[in-house]
Amino acid sequence: MTVFAMPVFDATVIYDGKELFKGKGAAGMWAEKLASELGTGITVEKIGTGWALCGNVDGADRQWGIHGQRLKRLD
């Protein structure tokens, strides 16, 4: 199963209209799963009051948060 279809049952916060991980530890766990699936390094970054997943995919910097209990790329 793709990591993008797995439910995210961790606490979240809304910051600037984006749903983010509330804790760095939970974000780090999902960063490891995402890195494994995409085959690239993924880190966690503090954005306001929450944490986002960050990495470079196909030469472009990307960030992921949560939408509807699923990982979603932030635009």
Image: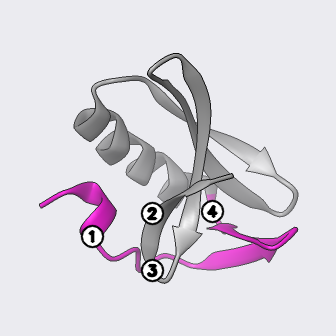
Q: What is the spatial separation of the Cα atoms under label 1 and label 2, in whole angstroms?
A: 8 Å
Q: Considering only order in the chain, which callout, 4 or 3, is on the residue closer to the N terminus?
A: 4
Mark 1 or 4, closer to the camera: 1
Percent x, y of residue 26 = 49, 60
The 10 Å Cα crowd at callout 1, few under 14, some 14 to 19, many 20 or more, is: few
> Of all residues shown, which one is farthest toward the top?
59
Where disc 2 sits, the SS reads strand
Question: Where does the N terminus fall, quadrant-wise?
Answer: bottom left
Mark 1 or mark 3, which has the lower sequence index? 1
Q: Which residue is mark 4?
A: 23
Task: Give the x, y percent position of residue 53.
Answer: 56, 45
Residue at the disc numbered 1 = 6
Q: CA distance from mark 2 to mark 4?
A: 15 Å
| Foreground pick, 33 / 38 | 38
| Residue on which disc 2 sits | 71
Magenta-tinted stretch: 1-23
User: Residue at coordinates 42% horizontally, 72% vertically from top-left?
Assistant: 70
Q: Are marks 2 and 3 in contact (CB under 8 Å)?
A: no
What residue type is disc 3 on?
Answer: Gln
- Left or right? Give the position of 71 relative to 15: left
Relative to residue 52, is residue 7 depicted above or below? below
